[in-house]
């Protein structure tokens, strides 16, 4: 029994312990991982552009001096075999040597300044230390007076900020009231114009219906007029046919009937026809008439029968003629009525059209007025909203100014009181600092500035040395001198590349053709090489990247198929674009620094052209920069390893991976990069 109770107690205690432990675990929060940081250091910032290119083989290479001057010597002859790096010709070195001498003097002076700063304090610095001590003592007296002034400023400033806050509230209320009234006024304008538009549109529809009716009546009248004219023309043709048949039948009424309709001309023609027939009858020989009386008697009998039959036909034709004349007279009356209707309705149509034009102008003007009213409503609402937003912003700003101002003034009072207490300490610190300053060199910022100036002077010296070196034209690769396009004593313009600058037009010109814009007689370049000892790579870059590329820039080409990476230089940029799938690219030609048998024409290489780089500058990874409101900021880790400070920095060259920092950070500062967790990193130099 005792053992059973003991076991129950142990189990109960264990369960209680587990329950308490679980509550503790549930109540605890996981610790966030430490931020990933990078240490600011000095190094190289490099920016490049990349593309894919292919190996090509060129037959000749035109070389020019990078700088202009007078040719003083030519070391090779046409047809001579040269090797890479062999001097070909020189120009006058005097200007370049003078520039180099000046750059050397500037660099020596900058170095002397650095050495001077590193030697220790100067009398001027000692005098400045004494001035600092006097200033600290003066600050003790000034701090006592500053307390009273800070208290007065707190009182007056608080009252001014409160008044500004009340004014901002009043401005917001006025802006809201004005906006509400504008909404009513602008909507009333829209309603009035819309009502007027509706009335004028209804009037336009009525006038349009009248115009359509009158146009239909005018069209009907014109159609009736056309039909009547066609009938009259047909009746006239019928009369002419009847009259022609009457003339053919020698009807006596033909002339009269035709004359009634057509005038005296037809009557005269009929009379002349009758007289002619009578004359023909009278001219028959008398002998023939008397020859046989029996024949004459028979002819008279037949003639009488024919006359009776002809008379009947003439009577019928006369009746037809009269009927057609009656029809035509009726149609003429109808034509007069139809023409009167057409004239009347055409007049109505003209009047209706003028009315419609006026109605359309009125409706169009109403529509424009309505559009203007709606636009005015939109503009007014937008303006009122902007005014309200501006007033709200002013109110927020006034509230912030009040809070910050009161806090700042109170801090000024506290600072002034602290200054009174610390002024004596400042005097002691300045005295101590004087001793320390006179025992050690200038502060590190001045030394760093002097060293930076010396580095710049050294870069200028290097550039001057390069210009002096460029007075000698050297072969960038093995080859044979095909053409020497200049002579000793000639002035050359420069602008070429001492390492293989191409004249893009040289390959398409005859050997003795004059280069466009050249002041010499050479074709393509001062020296043209053939049987080259290296290969070219042609790559197509985007329009944006091509704008950053210049002849002479260094590059690297990686041939993944053979596991080789070679250095190269840009020698030519095509001036004509290539468009593929609406994408504009430009072909850039690079010259490999050496030739390998493994590299074959057509091989593909990954080309990286260095467009900018800076040596020995402060740098940070791109991921450490936080763009904010057009400014660059970073998160600096405090010395305690926990606190973070947002600090604004000034950036310079933006490279592929790093960004140059020109101000805001010092060597050794730890900056948080994007992402969390992981160990701290050290920027490599």
Image: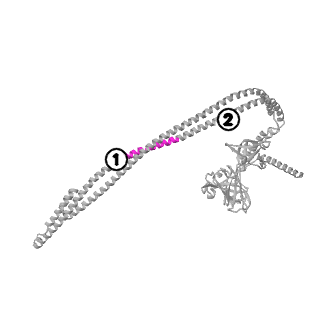
Q: Is residue 354 magenta?
A: yes
450 with respect to 483 (left or right): right
Tag 1 residue: 347
User: Counting other residues with Cα less than 10 Å from the Cα at mark 1, is it few (<14), some (14-19), or many (20 or more)?
Assistant: some
Q: Nearer the viewer, residue 189 or 27?
A: 27
Task: Tell me if I can see residue 347 in this picture.
Answer: yes
* Rendered location of residue 654, percent (x, y): 70, 47
Query: What is the span of residues highlighted in magenta in the rendered image?
Result: 349-375
Percent x, y of residue 101 = 74, 44
The answer to whether residue 268 is magenta is: no
- Could you tell me if residue 480 is visible in this image? no
Q: CA distance from mark 2 to mark 1?
A: 78 Å
Instruction: Give the prevailing secondary structure in the magenta stretch.
Output: helix
Q: Could you tell whether 196 is left or right of 250 in the image?
A: right
Q: Are marks 2 and 1 in contact (CB under 8 Å)?
A: no
Q: Nearer the viewer, residue 255 or 407?
A: 407
**Residue 662 screen position, x and y as percent:** 73, 43
| Place of residue 681 in the rendered image (x, y in percent of width and height, measured from the top left) | 78, 49
At 22% from the left edge and 60% from the top edge, which residue is drawn? 321
Label annotation for residue 400: 2
Q: Residue furthest front?
A: 1
- Quadrant of the rendered image containing residue 142: top right
For the residue labelled by badge 1, is the local secondary structure a helix, a strand or a loop?
helix
* Between 322 and 100, the one nearer to me in the picture: 322
| Residue 551 as seen in the image, left or right of residue 221 | right
């Amino acid at each position: 029994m005792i053992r059973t109770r003991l076991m129950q107690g142990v189990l109960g205690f264990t369960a209680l312990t587990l329950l308490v432990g679980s509550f503790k675990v549930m109540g605890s929060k996981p610790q966030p991982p430490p931020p990933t940081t990078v240490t600011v250091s000095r190094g190289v910032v490099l920016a490049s552009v990349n593309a894919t290119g292919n190996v090509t083989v060129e037959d000749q290479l035109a070389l020019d001096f990078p700088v202009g001057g007078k040719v003083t010597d030519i070391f090779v002859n046409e047809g001579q075999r040269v090797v890479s790096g062999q001097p070909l010709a020189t120009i006058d070195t005097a200007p370049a040597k003078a520039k180099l001498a000046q750059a050397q003097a500037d660099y020596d002076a900058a170095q002397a300044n650095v050495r001077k700063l590193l030697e220790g304090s100067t009398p001027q610095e000692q005098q400045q230390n004494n001035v600092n001590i006097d200033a600290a003592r003066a600050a003790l007296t000034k701090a006592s007076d500053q307390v009273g002034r800070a208290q007065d400023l707190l009182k007056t400033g608080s009252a001014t900020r409160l008044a500004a806050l009340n004014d901002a509230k009043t401005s917001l209320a006025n802006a809201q009231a004005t906006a509400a009234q504008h909404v009513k006024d602008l909507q009333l304008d829209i309603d009035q114009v819309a009502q007027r538009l509706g009335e004028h549109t209804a009037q336009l529809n009525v006038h349009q219906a009248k115009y359509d009716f009158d146009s239909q009546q005018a069209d009907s009248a014109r159609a009736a007029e056309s039909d009547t004219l066609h009938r009259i023309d047909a009746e006239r043709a019928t009369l002419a046919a009847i009259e022609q048949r009457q003339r053919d039948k020698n009807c006596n009424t033909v002339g009269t009937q035709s004359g009634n309709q057509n005038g005296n001309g037809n009557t005269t023609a009929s009379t002349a026809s009758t007289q002619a027939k009578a004359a023909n009858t009278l001219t028959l020989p008398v002998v023939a008439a008397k020859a046989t009386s029996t024949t004459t008697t028979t002819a008279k009998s037949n003639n009488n029968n024919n006359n009776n039959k002809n008379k009947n036909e003439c009577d019928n034709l006369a009746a037809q003629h009269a009927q057609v004349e009656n029809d035509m007279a009726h149609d003429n009356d109808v034509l007069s009525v139809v023409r009167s209707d057409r004239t009347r309705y055409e007049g109505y149509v003209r009047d209706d059209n003028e009315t419609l034009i006026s109605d359309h102008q009125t409706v169009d003007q109403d529509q424009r007025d309505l559009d203007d009213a709606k636009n005015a409503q939109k503009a007014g609402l937008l303006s009122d909203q902007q005014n309200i937003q501006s007033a709200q912003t002013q109110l927020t700003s006034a509230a912030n100014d009040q809070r910050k101002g009161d806090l700042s003034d109170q801090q000024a009072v506290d600072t002034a009181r602290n200054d009174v207490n610390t002024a004596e300490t400042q005097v002691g610190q300045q005295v101590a600092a004087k001793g320390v300053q006179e025992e050690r060199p200038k502060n590190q910022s001045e030394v760093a500035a002097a060293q930076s100036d010396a580095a710049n002077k050294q870069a200028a010296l290097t550039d001057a040395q390069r210009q002096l070196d460029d007075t000698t034209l050297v072969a960038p690769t093995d080859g044979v001198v095909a053409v020497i396009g200049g002579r000793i004593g000639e002035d050359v313009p420069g602008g070429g590349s001492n390492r293989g600058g191409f004249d893009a037009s040289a390959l398409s010109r005859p050997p003795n053709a004059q280069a466009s814009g050249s002041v010499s007689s050479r074709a393509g370049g001062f020296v043209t090489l053939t049987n080259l000892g290296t290969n070219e790579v042609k790559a197509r870059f985007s329009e944006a990247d091509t704008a950053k590329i210049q002849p002479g820039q260094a590059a690297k080409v990686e041939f993944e198929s053979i596991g080789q990476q070679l250095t190269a230089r840009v020698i030519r940029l095509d001036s004509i674009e290539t468009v593929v799938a609406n994408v504009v690219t430009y072909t850039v030609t690079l010259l490999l620094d050496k030739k390998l048998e493994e590299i074959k024409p057509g091989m593909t290489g990954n080309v990286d052209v260095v467009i900018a780089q800076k040596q020995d500058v402060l740098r940070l990874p791109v991921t450490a920069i936080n763009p904010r409101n057009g400014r660059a900021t970073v998160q600096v880790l405090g010395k305690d390893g926990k606190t973070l400070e947002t600090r604004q920095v000034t950036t310079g060259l933006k490279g592929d991976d790093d960004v140059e920092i020109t101000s805001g950070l010092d060597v050794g500062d730890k900056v948080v990069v994007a992402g969390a967790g992981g160990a701290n990193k050290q920027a490599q130099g």
